[in-house]
Image (spheres, grey):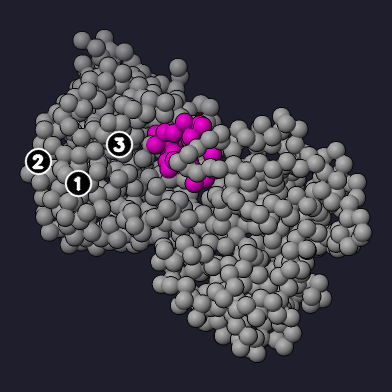
Amino acid sequence: MGLKSKDLLGLENITKSEIELILETAKTMKDILKRPIKKVPTLRGKLVVNLFYEPSTRTSSSFGLAAKSLSADTMNLSVKSSSVTKGESLVDTAKTLKALGADAVVIRHGIPGAAKLLAQTIDMPVLNAGDGAHEHPTQALLDMYTIKEKRGKIEGQKVAIVGDIKHSRVARSNIWGLTKLGAEVRLIGPSTLIPVGIEQMGVKVYNDLEAGIEGVDVINLLRIQRERQDKGFFPTIREYTKRYGLRREHLKLAKDDVTVMHPGPINRGIEISSDLAYGKEAVIEEQVTNGVAIRMSLLYLLLGGSRNE
Amino acid sequence: MSKLLLKGGKIIDPIQGSKAKAGEILIVDGKIAKLGENLAAEDAQVIDIEGKVVSPGLIDIHVHLREPGFEHKETIETGTKSAAKGGFTSVACMPNTDPVIDNQTLVEGLLSIAKRDGVVNVYPIGAITKGSQGKELAEIANMKEAGIVAISDDGHPVMNAEMMRLALDYSKDFDLTIVSHCEDKNLAGDGVVNQGYYSTITGLNPISSSSESVMVGREILLAEEAGAKVHIAHISTKESVDLVRQAKKRGVKVTCEVTPHHFTLTDELITSFDTNTKMNPPLRSAEDVAAIKEGLKDGTIDVIATDHAPHAEEEKDVEYNYAPFGIVGLETAVGLVITELVESGILTLEEAIAKLTINPAQVIGIDKGTLEVGKDADITIIDVDDKWEVKTEELVSKSKNTPFGGYELQGRAVMTIVGGKIVYSSDE
């Protein structure tokens, strides 16, 4: 079996068994990454294009490394684009990529739905590396992989996601994925950063950090961006940190063996205290490694593996 | 002397209070000469419209014809052809062209193009403020003399309440209606879709209901204080409908309109990320749509208007945030009204026709919207049973931006007559 769609656009529209397949395949990929020669010839001769409309070092290099580990060729295209300085349209760029002989495109874009627009335009696999506040499925998958690796299973785990839920594609993809696999998801943040109607996704919302993390297995902290303060979502970073910054003293409220996660890049001393970021509970660096494995898994399944037609 | 005799239709003219009745209409020299049964044909051209509904010519008081300035989207010629095919004999066009229609010369220019190229009656709406900048009043009296029927800064709501108060106070001297696009720009922010579950899961920036209703409330209070007339454009939320309902009970001179897409579609559609689901106001929740239908039924909502907003293919074939707001509406309006409102029992056919004829005529103060003897022979013949599929390639508007492609609708205009002249016939 394989994935039903030619693309990975998000976790809303894929099934539990597809997610399990991706996680299972990632395990094999992680084994490859542990070998002295971290490379297999699976995707030799394939061209994977990284099409990035937003600056990204982490996701872009993770995808690049994943492609290289499978022996695919890679090409990075960074496009500076805004509604003001419009260059070539996404649809036209997509057609160019096809003409250049790309076999798959990884896209990062600031606007929700951009990955879908690309996927509708070209017949090759499109992997969504983040589209606005919509979805960031590979980040959620690597988070889920990490939870499974650390805690043995996802079902029944209590996972708290803390911070700017409103603008977070990571949160949305995590909610879709985790709830599909039977985890209990809690969201914690000020009301100004909790989007309307999110309870309908099957989550519980808390405005109080201490109440929200009580008894949880996993705490996933989102990066807080200073520009949100400028727009008035909270008065100051200082006040935000006081209410939602995770510190060691909070951990006693959670499970004894709580796992602390962060998609990075972290703001030490803001959403997470320094000692926690480097503490034994934190798995932030493992998340990075697992990210490569997850992206290898997806490239393999979409480009190399057999897809269910 | 040109004569036309329409035979065998069912006449529905809300202002004459008539229920649908069989009858004939004799048109002489562009005017309605006689209504009745078994009229003598004499030397008239006879058109048999057996079984079809004969309505006063439909009037759409909210269209964007895009000329001058955006002729790649629509022109007065293509827009009025689209109107004719949709059954509309008169349209009122919004001033947000380039340049903005904010002075007498521009109104006259627009009317001369309309006279040359238009196939239906075109009534210009002038800007409230110069350049629709919201800073100083446009020369409203001069524009009125040149032929405007209302004023509006559509698309660029007057954010300064004092400016709106002045505009209401000033315009009442000429009995001119202000058409208000109610949107608080600060509350709407950079939003593109309705705020709710679907904006949350798509991650698209939300536009709250309050961004509309706050302004509806403001306009009502200002109009009430000034004793002026205000017409709320494209109402879309349940709170707005309720505010208008309460205001009407107090006797405020407020009227309002709704678009076919706002009584048909909900914001669930945005999950497709199809940019033809992007319009302003945005598609709202199912609850709002239910309140809109209730408002149509109880008479709170007076008018159905399309907000026909053509955009070129390349403008819509982009990322959601980059696409302009708006969809075309003239050619799908009748089908949507009959399918969504009449067939489902929300409105009788007569009530629906009133909201497309006499009511909009009264809002903008034009002597149209009825089939009384002596009036201009603006007539729309509607086949209320015809089932058809919306095919975007068949739209005669220059732009094809509609979310209704592939929809099965019931009812459409089969003939449109303006001033006694057949400007559209489905047989051709």
Tag 3 or tag 2, which sits nearer the N-term?
3
Mark 1 or 2, closer to the camera: 1
Q: Which SS class for mark 2?
A: helix
Residue A235 coordinates in the image, percent (x, y): 41, 72
- Using the image, name the chain to which the residue with label 2 belongs: B
Mark 2 or 3, closer to the camera: 3
In the displayed structure image, the side of residue B39 where residue A191 appears, left or right: right
Q: B120 and A271: which one is in front?
A: A271
Tag 2 or tag 1, which sits nearer the N-term?
1
Q: Which SS class for mark 1?
A: loop
What residue is shown with label 3?
A: B96
Q: Which mark is residue B95?
A: none
Q: Please tell me which residue is depicted at 15% across the width and 43% down the height of the picture.
A: B137
The C terminus of chain B: image quadrant: top left
Residue B114 coordinates in the image, percent (x, y): 27, 22
Marks 1 and 3, Cα distance to the nearest angstrom?
Answer: 16 Å
- Using the image, name the chain to which the residue with label 1 belongs: B
Which region of the structure is painted magenta?
B309-332
What residue is shown with label 2?
A: B174
Q: B216 and B183: which one is in front?
A: B183
Residue A279 coordinates in the image, percent (x, y): 70, 80
Q: Which mark is residue B135?
A: 1
In the displayed structure image, the side of residue A100 where residue B3 appears, left or right: left
- When the figure is inspected, residue A146 is found, relative to residue A208, above or below; the finding is above
On the question of residue A63 being in view, the answer is yes
Q: Please tell me which residue is depicted at 43% across the width and 43% down the height of the picture.
A: B325
